[in-house]
Image (tube, helix red, strand yellow):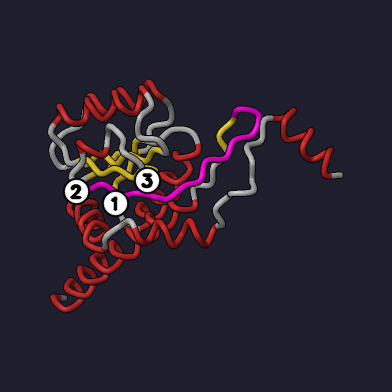
Amino acid sequence: MKYQIIHDRKQYGIEAAEQQTSVMDSLKQTLAINSRQNIEKTARLIYDSRQVIFFALGLSRIVALDLAKKLEHLNKIIIVPDDRDNCILYANNLTQGQIAFFISYSGSTDIICKLSYIAQTRGVPIVTLTGMSQNPISGSSVVSLYAYFRKLSYRDADITSRIGFYLVTELILEEYMKLFRMEQQLENEID
């Protein structure tokens, strides 16, 4: 059985899992590398914006869609372009009152770097959520957030868990909810 597993791993290109970081380790590391101030600042930027454009592709897009859906329920206007061409279209049309929120495992793919550059030229605030590494897009952001990852691939496909991304987005949502509730409370007191 051991030999079959070793053979299958080699045949199907599964990276060695012996050193894989546990989910709990990933969560602990992600919490350790992000400051509460950056989470709060991100929530405030989203709250104060007219509209949030998420730039995320592949598995990272699923994380963006999750946060987008939750924010939409709280009356925030959110756009998550569905492909590269639409991402370029939205990046080229960014205006004041919007923020560009990048979610990218590497923060260094050609399209993400291009979109980041376009967003910089448009003069809107940029928030990045990337894997814990030096990457080109984090340097251009107002707030840089990170998630701890241990890369995993199968048959040359990236199947790395995005649980660190989900943790960070849930923390942002929690802070956003505090701002949202305060506003609701003030409105109720005025009425």
Q: Position of residue 104 (x, y in %)?
A: 39, 38
Quarter of the image that includes the N terminus: top right
Mark 3 belongs to which amino acid? Met
Cα–Cα gap, marks 3 and 2: 27 Å
Mark 1 or 2, closer to the camera: 2
Q: Is residue 130 magenta?
A: no
Instruction: Answer above or below: position of 125 versus 83.
Output: below
- Would you say the residues marked 1 and 2 are in contact, meaning their CB atoms lie under 8 Å apart? yes
* Mark 1 nearby-residue class (10 Å; few <14, some 14–19, many ≥20): some
Q: Give the numbered dot on residue 49.
A: 2
* Mark 3 nearby-residue class (10 Å; few <14, some 14–19, many ≥20): some
Q: Earlier in the sequence, mark 3 or mark 1?
A: 1
- The image quarter containing residue 127 is top left
Mark 2 belongs to which amino acid? Ser
Q: How many numbered discs, if any?
A: 3
Quarter of the image that includes the C terminus: bottom left
The residue that disc 1 covers is: 76
Report whether 78 appears left or right of 29: left
Q: Earlier in the sequence, mark 1 or mark 2?
A: 2
The residue that disc 3 covers is: 132
Along the viewing direction, whichever of 181 and 187 lies nearer the viewer: 181
Q: Earlier in the sequence, mark 3 or mark 2?
A: 2
Cα–Cα gap, marks 3 and 1: 28 Å
Highlighted magenta segment, given as a residue range:
143-156
Q: Position of residue 26 (x, y in %)?
A: 48, 56
Please give the name of the residue rendered at 17% of the width and 73% of the height, measured from the top-left corner.
186
Along the viewing direction, whichever of 63 and 32 lies nearer the viewer: 32
Secondary structure at numbered mark 1: loop
- The image quarter containing residue 95 is top left
Along the viewing direction, whichever of 32 and 180 lies nearer the viewer: 32
